[in-house]
Image: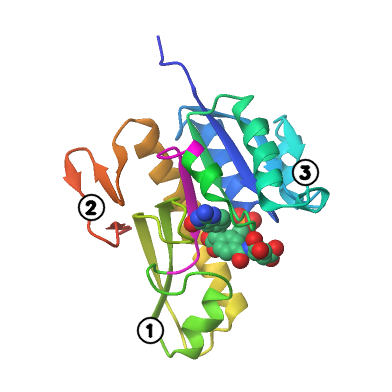
Amino acid sequence: MTAVKKKLVVLISGSGSNLQAFIDACANGDLNAQISCVIANKAEAFGLQRAADAGIKTAVVNHKDYDSREAFDTVLAQTIQAHKPDLVILAGFMRILTPAFVNAFAGKLMNIHPSLLPKYTGLNTHQRAIDAGDDFAGVTVHFVTPELDGGPPILQAKVAIDASDDAESLAQKVLQKEHIIYPLATKWFLDGQLTLQGNSVLKDKDLLSKNGLLYQE
Ligand code: NHR
Ligand code: GAR
């Protein structure tokens, strides 16, 4: 008998190409998991359509309907908890979360950030890497802690920046890596290999370095 499927809740704000990578990984058996619900903070997020097409439950919690971040996060947390997920996945989710929210899901909340953290926290990461003359851009899967983009990295992937790259071309190349490393890090988590310990990650018995692991094809 195969093990009971683990439950994921995925939070999105936009296109949901990372969500699609999870939908595909659950469908093809790369992940022994099911997506219990996809939640967006914007009704127009295209990822909601991807979820509906895959027969996955969706919900919209619009931050504009709430007076404060705390009020938004309270309803968001309730909407998630209704599904009792094993892991909550931020996949292009664009609202900064309050400490109360993050602490409620401590050790069960992951994000993918389009830079080689600790470089370029926040927004416009690819343009900033180009402007700085960096040779590489990249992406980081990390546990979420109250400090924005400051939670400990699990897995990174690098992409060379070519002279012809602009932020858009770089974003497309980085997304291809995202679609590989986010389901992979999730598989490790669901297999019980990853633990958030303070501001560090344990993979099996190894304490990961401050950049996490580097994905090599
Ligand atoms: N919340 C906490 N507490 N910690 C993190 O590490 C988080 C988080 C919430 C989201 C994703 C993050 C990213 O990977 C993320 C990590 C949104 C913003 C932002 O400035 C910054 C980083 C991230 C997500 N959001 C604006 C805000 O006022 C809104 C911007 C918009 O709507 O376009 O919340 O990059
Ligand atoms: C991804 O590149 C993700 O790393 C980034 O947004 C994109 C979402 O794409 N995340 C952030 O910038 C978080 N602030 P998707 O909607 O197609 O998965």
Specify which label sits upstream in the sequence, 3 or 2. 3
Residue in view at x 68 percent, y 32 percent: 79
Q: Nearer the viewer, mark 3 or mark 2?
A: 2
Q: Please state the quadrant of the image where ligand 2 appears.
A: bottom right
Residue in view at x 45 percent, y 35 percent: 30
Residue ID for mark 1 = 135
Q: Is residue 213 left or right of residue 166?
A: left
Residue 75, percent across and down?
70, 37
Q: Quadrant of the rendered structure where residue 24 is?
A: top right
Q: What amino acid type should be assigned to the residue bearing mark 3?
A: Gln
Q: What amino acid type should be assigned to the residue bearing mark 1?
A: Asp
Viewer can see residue 53: no
Which residues make up the magenta segment? 104-115
User: Closest to the observer: 143 or 74?
Assistant: 74
Instruction: Check disc 1: other Cα within 10 Å, few if <14, some if 14-19, many if 20+.
Output: few
Q: CA distance from mark 1 to mark 3?
A: 36 Å
Q: Is residue 209 left or right of residue 196?
A: left
Residue 166, percent across and down?
58, 84
Label 1: state its secondary structure: loop
Instruction: Check disc 3: other Cα within 10 Å, few if <14, some if 14-19, many if 20+.
Output: some
Q: What amino acid type should be assigned to the residue bearing mark 2?
A: Leu
Residue in view at x 52 percent, y 75 percent: 125
Viewer can see residue 69: yes
User: Closest to the observer: 144 or 28?
Assistant: 144
Residue 143, percent across and down?
41, 49
Residue ID for mark 2 = 208
Residue ID for mark 3 = 49
Residue 202, percent across and down?
24, 43
Q: Is residue 109 magenta?
A: yes
